[in-house]
Amino acid sequence: MKISYNWLKWYIPEVPEAEKLSDIFTFHICEVDSLDKLPDGDYVFDLKVLPDRAHDLLSHLGVARELSSLLGISFNDPTAQYKIPEATATNLQIKLETDKCRRYTARIVRNVSVGASPEWVVKHLESIGQRSINNVVDAANLVMYDCGQPIHAFDLDKVTGSIVVRLAKAGEEITTLDNKQVKLIEADMVIADDAHVLAIAGVKGGKVAEVDINTKNIIIEVANFDGTTVRKTRRNINIFTDAAKRFENDLSPELCDYAMREMSGLLLEYFAEGPEGPKGAEWEETIDVYPNKQTPRTLAFRLSKMSSMLGYELTPDEAEQVLNRYHFKFTKDGDKYEIDVPAMRLDLNIEEDMVEEFGRVLGYDRVAPKLPEMDFKPEIDEIYTKINIARAKLLEDGYSEVMTYAFCDKGEVEVLASASDKKFLRTNLKDGLVESVKLNVLNSPLLGIADIKVFEIGKVFFKDHEEWHVAYGGKKEIKEVTLDEFTSPEQENFVVPPASGFPHEQNLSAPAEYFKMWSLYPFIVRDIALWVPNAVSSSDVENIIKEHVNELVVKGPVLFDKFTKGEKTSYAFRLVFQSFERTLTDEEVAGVMEKINTALKAHADWELR
């Protein structure tokens, strides 16, 4: 969420300097991904707001309220100065045909003048990376980024009949404001009239009732939609919007009142002609359909538990100071407190939530860096021990461990969603190991391994149970048994487990080994074979080859064949070429091979084969 420093000063004029405020955010509220200074002197914070506070901190108002309470500085709401337009009766009809819409408020404004926004509105929007569209759309966007409540405006003259909030019909389509054709499913919620789908609820508006330069009459929509429904629809149609982000993290329906008042006040200011009032604009009364109002909540906590979980003593004075700063109404009965949870604080539900509240406000630096005293004797995990026994035995026997996919094209257990050729969970390890052997055989020149021996320890899945299996082998044969069978005392693989301690605690003095990333580009293999006098050793030939290779040779020369015939000995060496930056060409490799061959041919009694 991008937050403008100057915008915050609307609400909290005494806000600390931007650099200092960045630390306050980090240590008490949320991480700051970046802090940028704009040419006009403003600063923009990019806050990493976590889901538990997205319902109130994805807005300048929410952040300002939080800072005001945290720092104990005065809070000023500039929207309180907006005039309330005088309203006339309305014949607007709103129908809710799904309980996924928790509240829908709307009002008609007639005789509007759609055009450019005031300079201050454009400046506010541009400071957080948003572009100006027109004064009506900009007002809706400004309110969303200001108080967190998404707003939409429809062209009244393009709407037929009533406004209906319902689930989409199978196969129904809509063209969105950005000209994307979207096919809806029955789980998607839409805003419609008697003839068209006007918008995808909580996600995106449609072209049918778009507000443009010719619009004269508008409907302002301020609604609250079920977050889960919005999130599923957004994923279904693959459209992400700032409005959807706010709805899917849940919002209080009570926020609608504030947003409607702010939107109305902004438009009234737009269409004002001096102090006398609106210039031709006519305001109709607000329709508010709110079937099930948000229930007031209370939360009880014990001071003793707060202290126990925080790791330091939380005194009554400190606790009450925090409660008062955050305007929590509370009652006290000895050690027990009960607060009235503000409607906007959807994150406060259980006693443990208040532990976090006190901790972040008072500062986690108060927690002493002391390990708790625990009387803990570790127990040996039987399966983990057997896995380590099996792994140690196979590694000792020269096998290399691999991990293959648990998903495959056949099996007894089908998964809900996966790749088209991997819809089942495996019933054996052997099939995966066979494929692994094939791949490793192809790469054996690069690996420098003549005999491929691999193993895997993993779970296999049957309709009514799961099993741990061990599979091991190479090109000729793959064996597979259960983990219990492999580590059974009757088997030759059995190793007596340690009497105490964990298997991983053994061999703590082993030398450290480091992983080196392999190249993503293919390798090329070249062999060199030659006859030399018997007195010439393989190392003599190897040294000459090494003198004429370059950085493209990643392995070798490796002697892989030797035999003697009369007074001559044949040596065969293998070189592996590979780049970490590109796919090598035959010409590059041929150039290196030519240099090596020339050097070898310089010996008159050596003969290349």
Image (tube, rainbow, N blue to C red):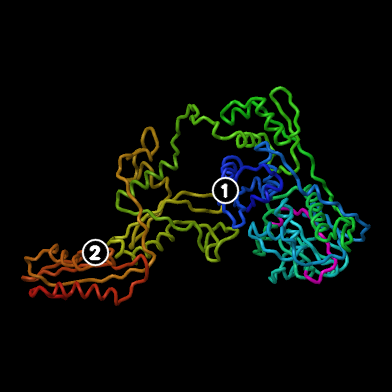
Q: Is residue 347 left or right of residue 198?
A: left
Judged from this view, the residue extending furthest toward the bottom is 587
Mark 2: which secondary structure? strand
Q: Which residue is mark 2?
A: 556
Residues drawn in magenta: 212-230
- Residue 483 lies in magenta, yes or no? no
Dot label at residue 173:
none
Q: Which residue is mark 1?
A: 32
Vertical placement of residue 378 versus 289, above or below:
above
Horizontal and vertical percent position of residue 433: 40, 59
* Residue found at x 18% / y 67%: 545
Name which of mark 1 and mark 2 comes first in the sequence.
1
Judged from this view, the residue extending furthest toward the top is 334
Judged from this view, the residue extending furthest toward the right is 89
Mark 1: which secondary structure? strand
Vertical placement of residue 326 versus 92, above or below:
above
What whole-number distance in Å separates the C-alpha atoms at marks 1 and 2?
A: 50 Å
